[in-house]
Amino acid sequence: MRYAAHRLAQAVPVFFATTFVIYAMVFVLPGDPILALAGDKPVPDQVLDVMREHYHLDEPLLVQYGRYMLGLLHGDLGETFTGQPVSELLQDRWGVTAQLAATAWIFELAVGIALGVVAGLRRGGIADTAVLAGTTFVIAAPVFVVGYTAQIVFGLNLGLFPTAGTDEGWPGSYLLPGMVLGSFGLAYVARLTRTALVENLRSDYVRTATAKGMRRRRVVGVHALRNSLIPVVTFLGVDFGNLMAGAVVTEGIFNLPGIGQQVFQSIQLQEGPVVVGVTTVLVMIFIAANLAVDLLYGVLDPRIRRARA
C-alpha cells in the first residue's frame, strides 16, 4: 500500500503540469476561434466581445486554466464554441476508439509475446530470422501504406473483413483496423520479448534451475519469461495510451467515427475545448497505465517493490 500511495502521489503533479502545458499550447495558438466560428460573415464587435467574455477568452491564461480544472473536478470537460458540452460530443466516439485500441492492444500483446518467445527460443534459426525480418518491414512501412494494403487485400479482394464503418460491431468491424493499428506495437513487443528472453536464458539462475533437473518448460515459463516481461510490460502500459491517441490515421482509413476523427475536425475548426478535453482524458489514461505498470513491476519482481516502497 505504501508503494502504491507513493506512485499515486507522484502522478498528481505530473497530471497538473501536463494538462497545463496542453491547455497553454492549444489556447495560445494564433487565430481567433470566435471569428473562425463566424466564418466569412461580418460580426459586430459587441457580439465578439460578448462571446469572448462568455467563454472567458478575455481572461489571463492561468485564470482560464483554473476555471477549466475546477470544472474538471466536477466531471465537466467544458463546452464547444457552439454551446455543446464536450462530454456529450465525445460520448459515442470514446467507445469506438476504446474498442479499436483494446483490439490492437490485445493483438500486439498476444501475438507479439508469442513471436518473441518463439524467436528467443530458436535464436539464430529460421523462425528467429523470419520474426526479425517481418518486424523490420512493419516498423519501416508507413501506417497508411499498411492500412490501405490490408483494406484492399483482406477487405476487398478476399472479403474476410469489412472495409469501413462499424455496422458489424465488435469484433467484426474492429479486427482489421485493430491489427493494422497494433502491428507497429506488435513488432516492438516481439523484439523486446526476444531480446530479454535471450539475455535471461543465459543467466546464472536459469543454468542453476536447469542443473537441478527442472523441466525446460518450467524454467522458461516461470523463471526466464517472467523476468523478461518487465520491459515488455513497460512498453505495453505506455502503448495503450499511444493507441488511443494515435488512431487518427487508422480511423480515417477505415471510416471509424472515433475521437481521432473528432480531434482532426476540431483542429480544423479551432475548437480548442474539444482538443483540450480529449487530451486531458488521454493524459489520465497515460497516468493510469503507468501507475498500473509500476504496480505490476512489484508483482513481477518483488525486489522492485521493496526498493521503491
Image (spheres, grey):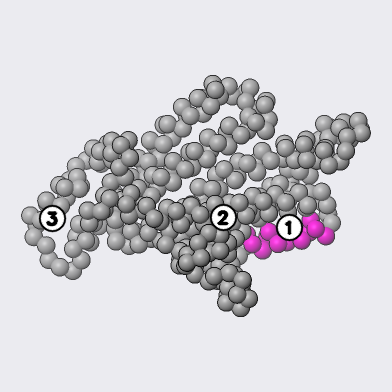
In the displayed structure, 211 sits above or below 112; it is above
Q: Which residues are magenta?
A: 126-139
- Residue 103 bears which disc, if any? 2
C-alpha span from label 3 to label 2: 45 Å
Q: Residue furthest front?
A: 168
Residue indicated by mark 3: 48
User: What number is the disc on residue 235?
Assistant: none
Q: Is residue 149 visible?
A: no
Question: Residue most toward the bottom?
Answer: 157
To which residue does mark 1 refer?
A: 132
Q: Quadrant of residue 73?
A: top left
Residue at point 84%, 56% (across, down): 125
Between tags 3 and 2, which lies in front? Answer: 2
Residue neighbourhood size for the residue with mark 2, other residues' Cα within 10 Å, grouped as few (<14), some (14–19), many (≥20): many
Residue 58 vertical placement versus 151 (above, below):
above
Callout 2 amino acid: Thr
> Alpha-carbon neighbours of circle 1 within 10 Å: few (<14), some, or many (≥20)?
some
- Element on which disc 3 rests: helix
x, y percent for residue 237? 57, 43
Residue 31 picture quarter? bottom left
Q: Work out whether mark 3 precedes mark 2 in sequence or the reverse, and give the earlier one.
A: 3
Three-letter code, disc 1: Leu
x and y percent of residue 248 in the render?
A: 46, 60
User: Closer to the camera: disc 1 or disc 2?
Assistant: 2
Residue depicted at x 68% and y 30%: 301
Magenta residue check for 40: no
Q: Position of residue 273 (x, y in %)?
A: 30, 50
